[in-house]
Image: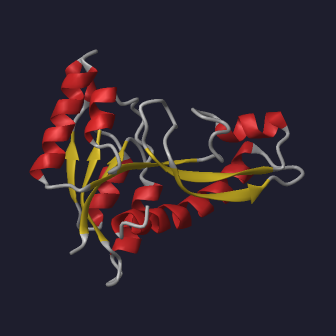
Amino acid sequence: MKKRVAVLISGRGSNMTALIEAARTQDYPAEIVVVVSNRPQALGLVRAREAGIATALIDHKMFGKDREAFERALDAELQAKRIEIVCLAGFMRLLTPWFVNRWSGRMINIHPALLPQFKGLDTHRRALEAGVKQHGATVHFVGVEMDDGPVIVQEPVAVREGDTEATLAARVLEVEHRLYPQALRMVAEGRK
């Protein structure tokens, strides 16, 4: 039986698209059941529908500052779809301990850096400013702290002379699109 997966997005959904493509192969152990966004204008919702995937919108703004009410609505959607694994793919919300603990060991995230380096936003700019020789991407189980939790898989990307944020980001994104489906396969097969 393929594991039932929800992908949570806030934007264009490029990593979501990589997961959808991987899940189309016969031997892939996971099925993308629903794509959920917290932003009505997320381009990824259109892409998911075009790929024949069910979508749901749970606009965080409708809940004001009540983060847990938003997360309870999100959790209800995931439960209704009998989701087994949650993949965060550019989901730009900090999750409360209640939600993280509820999905502990079943929620994964992709981050454009070699964690624990460069947690948070603007990872490529900060990597260039720090003068590191290696940057990269990490897929990890989601922990209570931001961009924390056990690493599933990482892949380095060499920082080249003359790199800009855009050139480095493009190479890291290529790695992300390969790495995330690999990590989801590992989790779905129980190898992580």
Q: Residue furthest bottom?
A: 26
Q: Up-down: is 151 above or below 184?
A: above
**Foreground: 106 or 30?**
106
Q: Farthest residue in the right direction?
A: 161
Residue drawn at 49 percent across, 49 percent down:
140
Can residue 48 be seen here? The reply is yes
Where in the figure is residue 78, as x and y percent of width and height? 18, 47
Left or right of residue 2, residue 119 in this image? right
- Name the outermost residue toward the left: 80
| Visible residue check, residue 39 | no
Question: Which quarter of the rendering shows the N terminus?
Answer: bottom left
Image quadrant assignment for residue 11: top left
Q: Residue 159, percent across and down?
A: 81, 52
Name the residue furthest front: 191
* Residue 3 locus on image (x, y percent): 25, 66
| Residue 124 relative to residue 86: left or right | right
Task: Look at 30% across and 36% down and name the residue there.
Answer: 101
Horizontal side of 171 relative to 182 (left or right) equals right
Q: Quadrant of the C terminus?
A: bottom left
Colour setup of the view? secondary structure
Q: Residue at x 40, y 73 (%)?
A: 22
**Residue at 72% in and 43% down:** 165
Task: Tell me where residue 62 appears, x and y as whole percent.
Answer: 20, 24
Marker count (numbered):
0
